[in-house]
Image: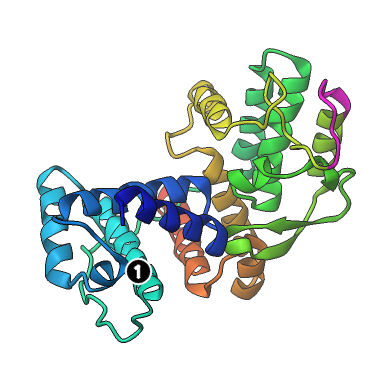
Amino acid sequence: MTTAEILEAWNAHLALSRRRSPHTVRAYAATVARLLHALEGEQDWQSLARIDAATLRNHLAERRAGGLGNVSAARELSALKTFIAFAREQAGDIDATRPRLRGPRVKKGLPRPVTPDEAVNLAETVAEDATAPWIAARDRAVLLLLYGGGLRIAEALGLKAGVLPLGETMVITGKGGRQRVVPILPIVRDGVAEYARLCPWPLDKDLPLFRGAKGGQLAQGLVQRAVARARVSLGLPATATPHALRHSFATHLLGAGADLRSLQELLGHASLSSTQIYTKVDAATLLDVYRNAHPRA
């Protein structure tokens, strides 16, 4: 088999069977392409299924020598293990020994939430900097969805206009095709309705809800750059990104008494362990308040 044929099958598996995002497909494809390039000789599914830990260790050692950090190395190892499992399925070789290799230790950083006022101010400032009223309404609506509903930016920008008009809840399809019900606050509902009223492009039900200046689907990079400009104006740290609004949604709900299982459902996490990080965030926030307020701290 050629490298192109292997990568084509791998990409199709990620996109269709595992329903990974385009970004993940590109990253995993690049990771596997580097491994295939490093391997000598023509490859087939049987030989790929038998890649062992020593081969992976040597490959990753070369990557680390080129400056690959711990976090990236851990991600590459995860991608390669997933690929080898796929190769075993393709080879029909379910008895092949899986490579046992532990990735580098990665210290998990805590998400940095913004305050409720900062979240709203960020949305308003982005809107004020927009070049047209409908773009101002669009950007404000997107950011309110991220903070008000805890959506990932890809989930918000992937919405179809068929969700209009918004009700009190909305069904979101997240990672892995998992669906969840998200409550919609009145301020979010009004913000999206104002955008829909001003949008110059037709909002047919099968078309993207949030549109770029030329009518195509709004790109994540445009939102990220707009937020970056706004946070400078507001004096917010570099951690105040669109994704930080989702973290803030979770942190503020937990601080107000939401239980972890409910929060897991609202965020669309497959595992409760992904949600438990917010207990540490809330504790960190309380410690910050304590240190700043207590006279003996």
Where residue 244 sits in the image (x, y, percent)? 52, 45
> In front: 292, or 112?
112
Secondary structure mostly seen in the magenta stretch: loop
State whether residue 201 appears in this view.
yes
Q: Residue at x 22, y 75 (%)?
A: 99
- Say left or right for 155 vs 63: right
State which quarter of the image contains the N terminus.
bottom left
State whether residue 293 appears in this view.
no
Label 1 sits on a secondary structure element that is: helix
Vertical order, 30 against 217 (above or below)? below
Q: Residue at x 81, y 24 (%)?
A: 201
Quarter where residue 254 is shown: bottom right
Q: Residue at x 52, y 63 (%)?
A: 18
Vertical order, 46 against 27 (above or below)? below
Q: Residue furthest top?
A: 131
Where residue 154 sits in the image (x, y, percent)? 60, 45
Kind of residue at disc 1:
Ala
Q: Residue furthest bottom?
A: 95
Vertical order, 92 against 258 (above or below)? below
- Say left or right for 115 vs 240: right
Identify the magenta region: 197-205
> In front: 58, or 197?
58
Quarter where residue 156 is shown: top right
Where residue 141 sits in the image (x, y, percent)? 74, 35
- Say left or right for 16 vs 58: right
Q: Residue at x 77, y 43 (%)?
A: 160
Residue under circle 1?
Answer: 87
Quarter where residue 123 is shown: top right
Count of numbered tags: 1
252 in the magenta segment: no
Where residue 247 sits in the image (x, y, percent)? 54, 52
> In front: 114, or 98?
98
